[in-house]
Amino acid sequence: MTKAKNVEEYIARQQMAIAGNPDCGVSHYNLAVALLGQKKYDEAEKELFAAIHCCPNMAEAYVQLGGLCLLRDDLDGCMAYNQQAVKSRAGFFEGHGNIGFVHLQKGEIDDAIRSLQKAIRWNPNFLQAYATLANAYLMKGLIDECVETNLKALELEPAFAIAHNNLAIVYLEKKKYDLAIKHADKAVELGYEVDPELLKEIETFRKEFG
């Protein structure tokens, strides 16, 4: 099969595939993802439901439905769909990561940490889970664990700006001002919008440690 030239052509192909085989969950899912890319959320949701109807254990579809709930600020809906995703496939790391994110949003820090650790066990390269886990550790006051987790993220992706920003915060907390300056500068260099108050605080130490 030749490659689709653009999204519209890709969507048309998926619609043709569905017309030929309405029970193909993968085609419904592929169409949904393309529609999500166009921000046609209602149409995408319909296709995701169709995908699940055809393939009740399609974990990816549940995660996408959870993402739509998040767009509506429906944390409980997001949680429920992601729980269904990991029920469908125990090792579906994205589902565990999203569950951890929702727990964190709800202030359930211990539950967030457990879910995020599980996500990383299933996928040790899951960069976003490290970032969220680091935030959870910071919120719990586990500064050393926060540093370790952010450093692990940077091992995976040295240009991960969020981790540099987080390290600037925690090193400032630990009074390691030279390291705070280094990571704040790197975050800025990578285009991250560092909190102006943090930058102001960093500047007070730059003459001595910069």
Image (cartoon, rainbow, N blue to C red):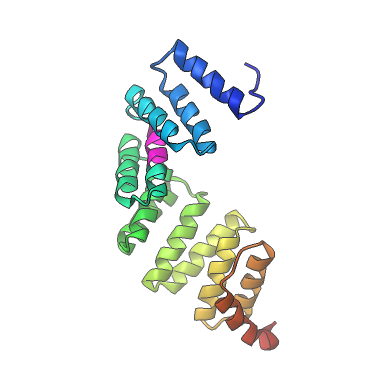
**Residue 126 image point, x, y percent:** 50, 49
Q: Is residue 195 left or right of residue 26?
A: right
Tell me where the magenta segment starts and ends, as one range. 58-65
**Residue 26 image point, x, y percent:** 45, 24
Residue 60 placement: quadrant: top left
User: In the image as oriented, which residue stretches furthest toward the top?
Assistant: 20
Residue 187 placement: quadrant: bottom right
State the residue in front, 102 or 182. 102
**Residue 135 image point, x, y percent:** 44, 64
**Residue 81 image point, x, y percent:** 33, 41
Residue 117 placement: quadrant: bottom left
Q: Does residue 36 sit above or below 166 in this rendering? A: above
Q: At 44% across and 32% down in the image, what residue appears?
A: 44
Q: Does residue 82 sit above or below 9 in this rendering? A: below
Q: At 63% across and 23% down in the image, what residue appears?
A: 4
- Look at the magenta stretch and give its main secondary structure: helix
Q: At 57% across and 68% down in the image, what residue appears?
A: 165
